[in-house]
Each structure stands twice: as C-alpha cells, then as structure tokens.
C-alpha cells in the first residue's frame, strides 16, 4: 500500500513538474513583458525621468526571457530586473484615492497582482504604483488642451523589419500609448488586452515588409476611431487604394453606384447611377467589403461603409470580374480601376452659402458659411419659420457666432475628460464648452440640423452646439462618432498615426464617440431614392418644415378667430350695458344706434 502511495505521489509530482515546466507560452511571455515594460515606462520614478534607454532595455529583456518556460522563472527574473533599476523612494505627493472628478472606465491595474506572478513581483509592482513618478515626464508631452503626445521616443531610423524584437518594439510602444492615454479605450469592440494577445503572433510571424505594415495597420484599426489611421510608404505604394470612375456606397446592404465622377471612364465601363455590384471575382461584393474591414479605420460601420469607394478593391489587380444588376437584369462584365490621380473629377455646381427654398424656410450650407457671414445670414432669416442647417460636411468654426442668435442664454453643450498624468490610465472630468449669450431677441423659429456619416469631428462638435437651441430637431443617419481633438504622432520612423486625444461628452455624460450625435428622426438613403435622384434627408427636413409652417398658420388662424370671438363678446357686453342704462333712463329702444356696435366678421 505504501509503495502504491509513493508511486502515485511520484507521478503527481512529475505531472506538476512538467506542468510548471511548460506553463508559460511565448505569446504569454511577450504579453506580460509588454504590459510590465509599458507600466514601468510611465510609473517607475527613475525610468520616467529618462534614466535608461528603455527601447534597448525592452529588446534585451525580450531576448533574455525567451528561455523561460514557467511563470515562476519569468517572475523571478522580472522582479530582479526591476530591483536593479534602483531604489524607489516613498512618494509623499502621490494620491492613493480617487478624486470626485475621476473618470475610471479606462483604468485597471489588477493585472499587476496576477496570482501567476510571484509574491515578490506582485509586491514590487504594487510598490511602484504607490510611489509612482510625479512631475514632468520624460516620455509624455501635452497638447494645447491637455491631450497626450509622445515625447523623447527614439526615431528608430535603422529599424529592420526582419528583426522580431524591433517589430515587437513598434507593437509595445503603440499598445501602451492606447493603454494609458486613449480616452475611449473602454469603448473598443475588442478588449485591449485581448488585442495584444491576438496581435503578438502576427508581429512575430510577419514574413514580409508588407506583412509587418499590415499588422501595424490592423492594430491601429482596433482602437475603433475615425481619427486613427496609418500612413507608411509601403501602405501608400501598395495596391491598397484602387478607384472606380464612379462613386460607390453601401445602400440598404448593397454596393451601389451613387454618383458618376469621371464621365468618360464611366461611359467606357458602362456604369450608371443606380447600378448594383453584386459580385467581385465570384464573391458577394458585400462579403468582400466586410473582409476588408480589419484594415479600414473608423468609429462605427457607417464610417467604414463610407470608405467603400476607397477600399473595396484593395489589393486586387485590374481588371476584376463583376456582376452588375440594372433594372432587375444581372450581367457579367469586367471593371478596371485607376489611381486617384488618373481620374478626372467633374466639377460640381457650388452650393450657395445660404438660400430660401420658400418664404418661410431658410437653408444654410455649413460647409461654406463663415463666421463673418453669420450676421448677414441671420438678419435675412430671423423671420423665417424654419432654418435648416446642413452639417453633412465640414463646418468652418461658426458655432459660436450662430449660438448668439439661436440661444437665449449661455449654455454648456459639451464636457471633457483628459488624462491624469499623475496616475497614468486614469482620466479626469475637466473643462467644458459653452455657446450663446443672454439674448431676449433670439431666433424663436424651428431649427433643423441635417447629419450623416460625413458629419465628423468638428462637425459633430458643431451639431452638439446647435442642439442647444430651444426648438431644435436633428434629422439624418448615424454620424462618424469621432469627437475630441486629433492627436497626431509617429509610432516609429515613417509610421504616422493619430487618435482622438480627449474625451468629449454631452453635459449629461452621454457619449457621442462611436455612436455619433443624438438623432431625433433617423433617415437612411435608399436604393429607390438614389435612383430617383432624391436627397432623402433634406426631403424629410422640408417635409417637417412644411408641417411646422402649417402648424404655425393653423395657430395664427385659431388665434385670429379667438380674437374675433373675444371682440364679439366684448361688443355684446357693451351693448347689453348700454341697453340696461337706457332702460333705466326710460329711453325708447329705437333711439339706439345698434349698427355702430356690430363686429366686423370679415
């Protein structure tokens, strides 16, 4: 019996030993290294001063820890590595709690206490949090509104994409920028830790320069931000952007020609507005578009679908085999596409800055209106029943000038979150945006705001301001969901990107990021509407405007009738008093001038 128990115990010991021997995969090891490296970069008092070449340390530690196969070995090395960085002095100014203005949806350091880490490593990481760096950070700069800007990063001009550790350096840098300083990290479709685990193998396995650049692009796309993107010479030179001579959009889940851009090339390709591209190289066109989305940056599908014209044929060789539906008939054909510079873009008629579709309706093209135009435009429109502001474009900073006319008082329309640089990963509610001023003679008619997927960034900010008008209605489709100042920076040399650098919210703390601005009446473009040449969003606004005018006319008529009734009753009352007075004086009734008391009913 004892011999049996001994054998079982030995087997158990061997099993545990083998389990410990291989319980740390390469991906997990690099995952932990990335997180610890970034944490030390922004938290450790000595590293945050720039005391070490932190990029060089990263490549060294990745190389050394490659031989470790267990969490125990890895933890022991990392704890000793941190120890030899130098002694950490107690921080007397480090706030250990959260302020009333703290925004914590992005913050999570629970991973530093991972039970798979050794007790020594967990204590070391916690000690760094409690005594974290305070002051002017070597690796952090701030923009004009407090947004994060990387500083003192080595340009890596000699980056060799073939070297795995250098590819991983690009991943480590960018992942930690987002981890600690992206205000909308909590809104990404995919958990940011899961993104790291998914992308590590792609950076490790990159076989070509293009593989590496596309891995970087896919990583950037995963922050789900229309301000993001990646500019590199390789991506710009690859057959990434292939253009048709006609505009295509996703309408009612179909790839549709919506506008002729180059008349001659479209004629040669036999493309017409209303054509539906059903298949591309024997694959459903919508399926092709969806498979490309991992390389299309955008806060929501409305933006990614907006990019269809630029991205549907990415990576393909011209010509492609397609099937096209027109008037119910489907025909096979081939399509050639072109470089942007090879397409002759037809000049479209310039829209006026403002116009009057009717005596009671004003229309404002916010793409053309300037602040200097606002006084004249509003002087012409103050008596209109409805003013339509078309913000399906790029406004020119007119929201403050407009609010002076549209609002009766100073009003807050947005509030901000900004990084808390004393506690990286945390943000604070700080600052607000106001518009309007005290004005008893403000515009009291109906304000209608038009939006769609082209309403992005400053346009959305402008809409949020217009939405503070007392009698306002927003009509259209989902906007780009991209608010906050754009922060632009290189990840490594010649890899340029951007992100929304500050959080922007409605005053009730509702997000506009990703979801877009609030819409009262949703209107989507339809296949039938495009074929009929309609602007369905504007048409809906005109319909609402006419209803408003009809309501105003009905109210005016009702008020006039009420006034007539009031005057008639007043005349009868005065006539009755006159009769009573005459009877009291015994005057004959036929002496009354009754006609003089009649009310004019006309």
Image (spheres, rainbow, N blue to C red):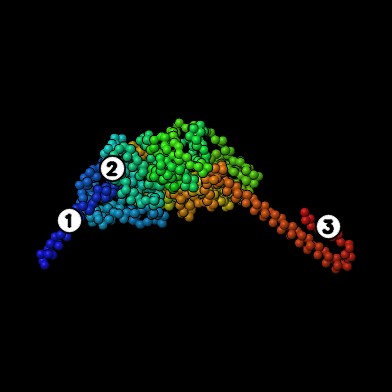
For image coordinates 28% across by 43% down, the residue present is: 204
How busy is the neighbourhood of tag 2: few (under 14 within 10 Å), some, or many (20 plus)?
few
Front label number (2 vs 3): 2
Q: Which mark is residue 17?
A: 1
Chain-order first, disc 1 or disc 2: 1
Residue 2 seen in the current view: yes
For image coordinates 31% across by 35% down, the residue present is: 157
Instruction: Give the quarter of the image for residue 218.
Output: top left
Q: Nearer the viewer, residue 322 or 13?
A: 322
Disc 2 target residue: 205
Mark 1 secondary-structure assignment: helix
Disc 3 target residue: 596
Q: Find residue 25 and report its horizontal and vertical position in percent.
A: 24, 50
Mark 2 secondary-structure assignment: loop
Q: Nearer the viewer, residue 394 or 326?
A: 326
For image coordinates 20% across by 49% down, the residue present is: 68
Q: Quick one: quadrant of the C terminus?
A: bottom right
Mark 3 secondary-structure assignment: helix
Q: Find residue 369 and report its horizontal and vertical position in percent.
A: 56, 40
For image coordinates 10% across by 66% down, the residue present is: 2
Q: Is residue 206 left or right of residue 430?
A: left
Q: Find residue 361 and report its horizontal and vertical position in percent.
A: 62, 46
How busy is the neighbourhood of tag 3: few (under 14 within 10 Å), some, or many (20 plus)?
few
Q: CA distance from mark 2 to mark 3?
A: 101 Å
Q: CA distance from mark 1 to mark 2?
A: 30 Å
Q: Is residue 581 left or right of residue 157?
A: right
How busy is the neighbourhood of tag 1: few (under 14 within 10 Å), some, or many (20 plus)?
few
Q: Nearer the viewer, residue 269 or 170?
A: 269
Tag 3–tag 1 contact (CB < 8 Å): no
């Amino acid at each position: 019996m004892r011999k049996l128990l001994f054998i079982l115990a030995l087997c158990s010991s061997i099993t545990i030993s083998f389990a410990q021997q291989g319980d740390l995969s390469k991906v997990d090891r690099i995952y932990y290294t990335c997180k610890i490296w970034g944490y030390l970069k922004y938290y450790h008092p000595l590293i945050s001063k720039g005391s070490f070449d932190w990029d060089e340390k990263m490549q060294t530690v990745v190389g050394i820890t490659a031989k470790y196969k267990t969490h125990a070995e890895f933890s022991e090395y990392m704890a000793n590595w941190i120890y030899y960085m130098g002694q950490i002095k107690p921080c007397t100014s480090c706030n250990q709690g959260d302020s009333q203005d703290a925004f914590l949806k992005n913050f999570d350091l629970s991973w530093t206490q991972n039970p798979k880490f050794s007790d020594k490593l967990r204590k070391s990481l916690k000690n760094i949090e409690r005594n974290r760096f305070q002051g002017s950070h070597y690796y952090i700069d701030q923009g004009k509104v407090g947004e994060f800007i990387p500083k003192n990063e080595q340009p890596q001009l000699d980056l060799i994409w073939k070297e795995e550790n250098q590819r991983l350096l690009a991943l480590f840098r960018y992942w930690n920028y987002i981890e600690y300083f992206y205000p909308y990290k909590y809104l990404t479709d995919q958990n940011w830790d899961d993104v790291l685990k998914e992308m590590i193998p792609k950076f490790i396995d990159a076989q070509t320069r293009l593989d590496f650049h596309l891995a970087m692009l896919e990583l950037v796309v995963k922050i789900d931000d229309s301000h993001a993107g990646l500019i590199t010479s390789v991506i710009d030179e690859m057959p990434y952007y292939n253009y048709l001579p006609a505009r295509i959009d996703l309408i009612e889940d179909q790839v549709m020609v919506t506008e002729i851009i180059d008349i001659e090339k479209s004629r040669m390709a036999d493309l017409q507005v209303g054509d539906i591209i059903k298949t591309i190289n024997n694959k459903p066109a919508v399926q092709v578009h969806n498979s490309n989305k991992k390389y299309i940056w955008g806060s929501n599908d409305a933006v990614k679908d907006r990019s269809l014209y630029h991205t549907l044929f990415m990576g393909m060789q011209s010509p492609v085999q397609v099937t096209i539906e027109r008037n119910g008939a489907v025909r096979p054909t081939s399509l050639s596409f072109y470089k942007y510079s090879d397409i002759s873009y037809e000049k479209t008629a310039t829209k006026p800055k403002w116009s009057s579709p009717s005596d009671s309706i004003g229309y404002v093209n916010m793409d053309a209106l300037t602040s200097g135009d606002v006084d004249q435009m509003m002087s012409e429109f103050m008596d209109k029943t409805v003013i339509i502001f078309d913000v399906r474009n790029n406004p020119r900073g007119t929201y403050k000038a407009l609010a002076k006319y549209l609002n009766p008082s100073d009003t807050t329309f947005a509030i901000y979150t900004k990084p808390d640089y004393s506690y990286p990963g945390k943000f604070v509610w700080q600052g607000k945006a106001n518009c309007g001023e005290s004005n008893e003679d403000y515009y009291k008619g109906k304000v209608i705001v038009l939006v769609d997927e082209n309403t992005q960034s400053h346009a959305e900010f402008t809409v949020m301001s217009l939405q503070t008008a007392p009698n306002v209605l927003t009509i259209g489709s989902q906007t780009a969901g991209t608010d906050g100042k754009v922060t632009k920076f290189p990840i490594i040399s010649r890899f340029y990107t951007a992100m929304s650098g500050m959080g922007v919210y409605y005053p009730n703390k509702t997000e506009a990021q990703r979801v877009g601005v609030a819409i009262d009446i949703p209107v989507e473009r339809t296949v039938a509407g495009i074929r009929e040449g309609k602007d369905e969003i504007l048409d809906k606004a005109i319909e609402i405007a006419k209803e408003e005018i009809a309501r105003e006319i009905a109210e005016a008529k009702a008020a006039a009738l009420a006034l007539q009734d009031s005057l008639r009753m007043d005349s009868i009352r005065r006539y009755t008093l006159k009769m009573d007075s005459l009877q009291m004086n015994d005057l004959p009734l036929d002496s009354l001038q009754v006609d003089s008391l009649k009310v004019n009913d006309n």
